[in-house]
Image: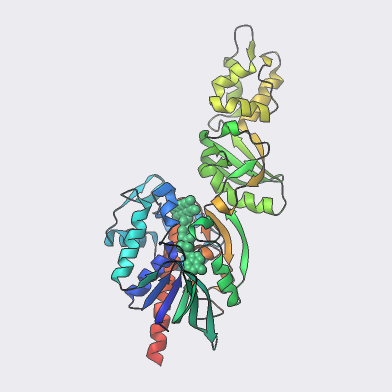
Amino acid sequence: MKQYDLIIAGAGASGLMAALSASREGLKVLLLEKMEKAGRKVRITGKGRCNITNTKPWNEFSEHIYPKSNFFKPAFRSFSNSDTLNLFEEIGLEVSVERGERAYPASGKAADVVTALTDEILRNRAEIKYLSKVTGFTTENNLITSVSWEESGVARTSVAKALIIATGGLSYPLTGSDGDGYKIAAQAGHSVSQCLPSLTALMPVKFDTALSGLLLKNVAVKLFVGKDLVQEEFGDTEFTSNGLEGPLGLRISRKAVRALSSGNKVFVEIDLKPALTEDQIIARIKREFSADGKIRLNDLLVKLLPKQLIIPFGNSSGLLQSKILSLQFTGEIYKLADLLKCWRLEITGFTSFERCVITAGGINLDEILPKTMASRIIPNLFFAGEVIDLDGDTGGYNLQIAFSTGHLAGRSAAYLIKKSSSNS
Ligand SMILES: Cc1cc2nc3c(=O)[nH]c(=O)nc-3n(C[C@H](O)[C@H](O)[C@H](O)COP(=O)(O)OP(=O)(O)OC[C@H]3O[C@@H](n4cnc5c(N)ncnc54)[C@H](O)[C@@H]3O)c2cc1C
């Protein structure tokens, strides 16, 4: 039976980083990946460009981490966003920082991130095995002693002094992350907090597919759960065939999905004219009336909204496009101004794990030591990445979570192993 210091389950963003930090500490590392190559998910991140991190300082960065940014603080301190930039530069991957403090490989190719990491891991003499799925482990005196895995379906066992579970969450299972880590962790007695899709498309009731492809720039979006306003965002949003997406749609999806899953009514209000007050909109509408004080609603909407939005907006707001508005009936003008300020859509569904960006939920934070990423149940078991109940907004936050927790788990495993061998 082959013996290793450390076995890592999963060669995604966090597992690769864990393998890199542990092998640099001199550990004999075996990285097991169940897919045919490393980082299948990393390769599709950032629309193939891979937004590797966000360079905001911690006080701003932490506002984008859920459910408890404090849990993530020690990991971020041990390997911050600037450490990510420095590491990639050091291993030969040029990085450029773009709008919104988002960092990408200068090549624009996500695959280059995976290549840079795997090359460096191999240079540090770690072993990587593909089509190798971790299935469990054995313990003696509450410590992991060996790890069971299957190589192309053939059962194997390897002796290990520590195990890192870096198997990802449930999002985009085609890339390999389909919840294995939760089952392996359950063997140790770990619990999993409710997992829900996040950074995902929200489906309005009676969704008009004519909206698909419409990008709304500089709008304000409010999320209501029942009557309560729970989130307000400003920026760009987009409709796709899956419903409301784009930066704002994704950002509000965490709370929206949670509310829908608890059986609550969820509404989105889009302010289509955030730069104008209702009075300014009314004045603007009145200017469009012809000399006889009349205008057809459709002709008015053409002046106020993107073409693609006119019919869906009219239909969902119960407006008759052919209606003739008159300056004498100001009630209709007020109503239209009100609708432009808060176009209300009821959200009744969302895109599930097959195509969401991240899993909200995972291994319970109370069961992991934030300073080491070690299990509070089995001291030589560690966790890294999306498998943990930690997630972030779009903008490079999730990969930084994976890199920081991966680095810390790898380094902590090395520290533990060196300490126990110096004691024995
Ligand atoms: C479409 C998309 C775009 C994204 N874009 C960005 C972005 O630009 N910036 C950003 O910060 N985040 C982005 N993310 C999120 C980011 O990809 C994840 O946060 C990150 O990949 C999580 O890393 P991880 O190592 O925890 O999991 P993963 O990267 O999912 O890796 C887990 C690995 O473990 C393997 N595995 C699973 N079970 C086993 C097992 N039993 N044995 C062995 N191996 C196993 C899997 O095959 C997989 O390779 C995006 C996600 C998606 C889906």
**How far across and down, in percent of the image, does residue 192 sit?**
61, 67
Q: Is residue 319 visible?
A: yes
**How far across and down, in percent of the image, does residue 337 sit?**
63, 26
- Image quadrant in which you'd find residue 88: bottom left
Q: Is residue 373 visible?
A: no
**How far across and down, in percent of the image, does residue 343 sit?**
63, 33
Is 388 left or right of 25, judged from the image as shown?
right
* Residue 24 drawn above or below residue 399: below
**Residue occupying image coordinates x 43% and y 75%:** 7
Between residue 284 and residue 310, name the one nearer to us.
310
**Could you tell me which quadrant the N terminus lies in?**
bottom left
* Residue 111 drawn above or below residue 317: below
Is 171 left or right of 96, judged from the image as shown?
right
* Residue 21 drawn above or below residue 174: below
Residue farthest to the top? 292
**How far across and down, in percent of the image, does residue 67 sit?**
57, 60
Q: How many marks?
A: 0
* Residue 183 drawn above or below residue 82: below
**Residue occupying image coordinates x 53% and y 38%:** 238
Residue farthest to the bottom? 424
Between residue 30 and residue 219, name the one nearer to us.
30
Between residue 15 and residue 401, name the one nearer to us.
15
**Could you tell me which quadrant the C terminus lies in?**
bottom left
Coloured how? Answer: rainbow
**Residue occupying image coordinates x 61% and y 31%:** 341
